[in-house]
Image (spheres, grey):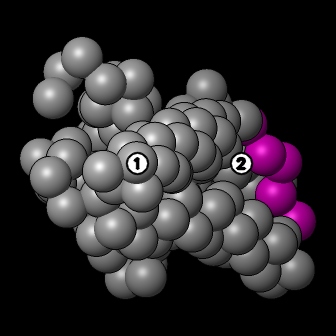
Amino acid sequence: MIQRIQTLFLLAVALLSGLMLSGDLIQLTAGSGTIFSISFPGMENNEGEVIQRLWPMTIILAVVPLLAFIAVFLYKKRSLQMRLTMLVLLLSLGTLILGAFYVIMLDRKIDVNIIWKVKVLFPLISAILAWLAYRAILKDEVRIRSYDRLR
């Protein structure tokens, strides 16, 4: 299980996605000096109060590390592991799209300056790692099928 490169990719996806559950993803400063931040629970203000729950983002941020970790243990069911890895990839890209959507919508309502955090890149890196894991699982599946043909 750990000897396979896709296991390392999926564990890295789970780790990066798990790190997104704590701390701010993006900070936004309004002209009045108010600082908003988008994090796992939702949009927060200066005092840490949740102003608005961002349920789609919260659900995706919670599900991605869980699915990536589950996919690690599905090495005997490669087709299911491939589907789960593709779902992780799509959800990681969905995190990027949702984050951009929330920032654009808030920028339309209030004129804000965006303070980018390093965690903004984690969904992109997770998507790339999930794609690499998918390719490695696919190579294993092709190799197993070729062995079955030879028998």
Residue 92 rendering spot, x and y as whole percentages: 54, 58
Please report the bounds of the magenta region as a residue range: 111-115
Q: State the residue at coordinates (24%, 17%).
A: 3
Residue 1 seen in this snapshot:
yes
Which of the two marks, 1 or 2, is nearer to us in this view?
A: 1
Q: State the residue at coordinates (78%, 46%).
A: 114
Of residues 66 and 74, which is closer to you in this image? 74
Q: Main secondary structure of the magenta part?
A: strand
Helix or strand or loop: what does disc 1 sit on? helix
Residue 67 rendering spot, x and y as whole percentages: 25, 60
In the image, residue 118 above or below residue 38: above
Helix or strand or loop: what does disc 2 sit on? strand
Residue pointed to by mark 1: 150
Residue 113 painted magenta: yes
Of residues 64 and 70, which is closer to you in this image? 70
How far apart marks 1 and 2 lie (CA) works out to 63 Å
Question: Is residue 132 toward the left or the right of residue 15 in the image?
Answer: right
Residue 142 rendering spot, x and y as whole percentages: 50, 51
Residue pointed to by mark 2: 29
Q: Label 1 is placed on what type of residue?
A: Leu
Among numbered discs 1 and 2, the one appearing first in the sequence? 2
